[in-house]
Every structure is written in C-alpha cells, then in structure tokens.
Amino acid sequence: AQSVTQPDIHITVSEGASLELRCNYSYGATPYLFWYVQSPGQGLQLLLKYFSGDTLVQGIKGFEAEFKRSQSSFNLRKPSVHWSDAAEYFCAVGATGGGNKLTFGTGTQLKVEL
Amino acid sequence: KAGVTQTPRYLIKTRGQQVTLSCSPISGHRSVSWYQQTPGQGLQFLFEYFSETQRNKGNFPGRFSGRQFSNSRSEMNVSTLELGDSALYLCASSLAGTREGYTFGSGTRLTVV
C-alpha cells in the first residue's frame, strides 16, 4: 500500500525567504506524485505533478519540486515566499498500476511572517 | 472553462438523517472521486467513478455510497448520519484517472448535530 509522510506540521518563514516542504512516500515502484495547496475553507489546488522524465518539476506560482528516487522524496521548493503563499500544503501519491486514488500526507501549514 | 462544482457548500443535518451531495465535474472529465477531510483523519479517499462504474472504493462503512450519471455528474449519499461524519467532502475530477491529475471542487461542509 502507498503512504505519504510530511514530517513538518507547521513551518514559519519570513516573506522573501526560501521555502522547502518535505515529502517522503512509500510505494513499490515510481508513483505519480502531486503537491496541492489549500486555503482556509477552500478545495485543493494543484501546484505541480510528476509522472516520469525530468526529476525537477516546475509548477504554478513559482513552485518547483524534485523527485529523488533514492530518497523516496518529492520536496517542494520556492526561492522567495510571498505573504499570499500562507496556506496548507499537501503531498499526494497515486499508484501507477491503477487504483485511481490519491493518498495524501497530513499536510504542512505554512505561515509567512511579514 | 468551469471548474468542479459542488453543491451545496454548507449543510447542517441531524444525527440519524441521510444526506446527498452533488458534484459536477469539468466538462469532458469522466473520472470523479470523492474525499473526506477531517482535522483528525486528514484527507481520505471514499470512492472513484468512471463512466458510471465504481472503479475503486476506500475503507468506509456501507453508509457511504455514491453514483455517477451518464453526463459524469456524481452524487454521494450518507445514510444514518453520525456526529463523526461532520467533515469537508471534496469532489475531484479527471479526464480518465490519476495520471491526468485531479481538479478539486471547493467542497461541501457537512455538520451533523
């Protein structure tokens, strides 16, 4: 069974600082990997996704993520955080062998200090 | 183009009642999934439909059911509501499944009193 670990429940960064949110997954093969963002009371917005190929993936809002097979990780990064990035971020894994479901991590709540 | 539309946005029900939530996927999307989000359990997969057929089901009791219509619109039903069913229910649609990625709606906030 697939699983996702987001070790940081809360992260606080200053506006303009760089950001890295950690995500580790467990799956028997190379999975489909996703990062979603959720603002309070809203649904999930897809930031980026990885299926295969280039291990550095570019997403919306200036985010990127790097897939590292050896570390079973898919960390999300942004070089300069804006106050509007404050939200909850979820990493998710999908099985490549079918199943058509996403398994989510517990989320990381990002706070941005002005 | 229009996104995933969920109705209603908010719902208050009494324990023991039943409830039906609706989801209209993005036009052309044939896969619709449902997730439950709670502070304690996080985001949990309920079920996924494709072309009116349930392809996958999560680990929820039989009180939770769903269906998909020929126009890809989907409904989920919860019978005999319990206080623990209070949650944000999210619908997501995709062209065909996981590989294409899922677009989520804004959710239906269900409160059971």
Image: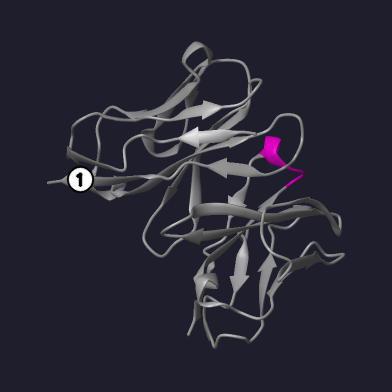
Q: Is residue B89 depicted above or below B113 in this figure? A: above
Number of numbered discs visible in the structure rendering: 1
- Identify which residue is drawn at 64% across, 41% down: B101
- Name of the residue lying farthest toward the top: A70
Q: Circle 1 — which element?
A: strand
Give the camera-side residue of B22 and B111: B111
Q: Amino acid at mark 1?
A: Val
- Name of the residue lying farthest toward the left: A114
- Residue B66's quadrant in the figure? bottom right
Question: Residue B20: percent from the left, percent from the top?
Answer: 68, 78
Question: Residue A67: percent from the left, percent from the top?
Answer: 50, 20
- Residue B36's quadrant in the figure? bottom right
Q: Is residue B62 depicted above or below A33 in this figure? A: below
Quarter of the image with the N terminus of chain A is top right
Residue range (magenta): B95-100
- Identify which residue is drawn at 28% across, 49% down: A86
Q: Is residue B99 magenta?
A: yes
Q: Is residue A3 depicted above or below A30 in this figure? A: below
Pointer 1 residue: A112
Q: Is residue A30 depicted above or below B88 in this figure? A: above
The subunit letter for the residue under badge 1 reads A
Q: Is residue B15 magenta?
A: no
Question: Residue A22: percent from the left, percent from the top?
Answer: 37, 29
- Identify which residue is drawn at 56% across, 27% down: A26
Question: Residue B87: percent from the left, percent from the top?
Answer: 50, 68
Could you classify mark 1 by the number of other residues whose Cα lies within 10 Å: few (under 14), some (14-19), or many (20 or more)?
some
- Residue B47's quadrant in the figure? bottom right
